[in-house]
Every structure is written in structure tokens, then in C-alpha cells.
């Protein structure tokens, strides 16, 4: 059983619409949060000044570049590129 709390009225949010909202929430959670866990961001000791924002931007850039390159599994893509230090900068692979 699933419970959902919303301020939407029943007429404007039938079960199919509510299900779509829930699915889109989990899609965001799976595409963003769990990918960031791959970078072990929660244990980062970068906490002062602009450094946390800069590091978050660098992580987001890496994720975006990997996705643009066609990778769906970011953890596997990171392992793939980590095996060869020249691979991330090689434009032919």
C-alpha cells in the first residue's frame, strides 16, 4: 500500500496523475542522488568557502559529460575511464 500527501484536489489529481508525480520523483532521485553517491560526496571534507560549490559543479560536469557520451551507468563509466589515465582526454574513444 502506498500513501501520498498532497494539497491537490481529487478532481485535479486522479490516481494516474499522482502515480506520474511519484514516478517522476523517483526518476530524479535515481538519476541525481544515487549518482552523486558514486562520487562519495557525503564524506567529502571540502566544507569552507566556495570549495563545496566548486566541487559540486565539477561532479555535475563529469556526470553530464559521461551522459552526453552515452553512458547510462555512471559508476561503470567512471571505472572504465579510471583504468587508463589517457582515456578521458582521448577524443577517439
Image (tube, rainbow, N blue to C red):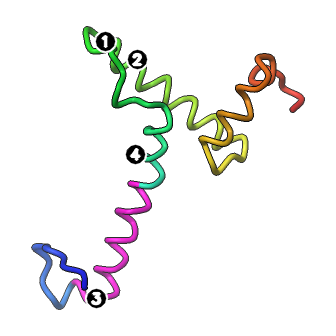
Q: What is the spatial separation of the Cα atoms under label 4 and label 3, in whole angstroms?
A: 26 Å
Q: Residue at x 65, y 33 (%)?
A: 78
* Residue 40: x %, y % from top left: 43, 31
SS of the residue at dot 1? loop
Foreground of the two, 59 or 16: 59
Given contact means CB atoms under 8 Å apart, are the residues at marks 1 and 3 in contact? no
Q: Marks 1 and 3, Cα distance to the nearest angstrom?
A: 43 Å
Q: Which residue is mark 4?
A: 33
**Residue extending furthest toward the right:** 92
Marks 1 and 2 sit apart, C-alpha to C-alpha, by 6 Å
Q: Name the front one of labels 4 and 1.
A: 4
User: Which stretch is magenta?
Assistant: 13-29
Find residue 15 and name its label.
3
Reply above or below: 54 against 35.
Answer: above
Query: Circle 3 — which element?
Result: helix
Q: Is residue 67 above or below residue 90?
A: below
Q: Earlier in the sequence, mark 4 or mark 3?
A: 3
Of callouts 4 and 2, the N-terminal one:
4
Task: Residue 6: name its quadrant.
Answer: bottom left
* Residue receiving disc 1: 50
Mark 4 to mark 1: distance in Å?
A: 21 Å
Q: Nearer the viewer, mark 4 or mark 2?
A: 4
Amino acid at each position: 500500500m502506498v500513501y501520498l500527501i498532497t494539497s491537490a484536489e481529487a478532481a485535479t489529481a486522479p490516481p494516474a496523475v499522482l502515480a506520474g508525480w511519484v514516478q517522476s520523483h523517483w526518476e530524479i532521485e535515481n538519476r541525481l542522488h544515487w549518482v552523486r553517491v558514486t562520487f562519495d560526496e557525503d564524506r567529502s571534507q571540502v566544507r569552507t568557502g566556495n570549495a563545496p560549490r566548486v566541487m559540486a559543479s565539477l561532479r555535475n560536469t563529469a556526470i553530464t559529460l559521461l551522459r552526453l557520451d552515452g553512458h547510462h551507468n555512471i559508476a561503470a563509466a567512471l571505472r572504465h575511464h579510471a583504468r587508463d589515465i589517457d582515456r578521458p582526454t582521448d577524443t577517439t574513444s
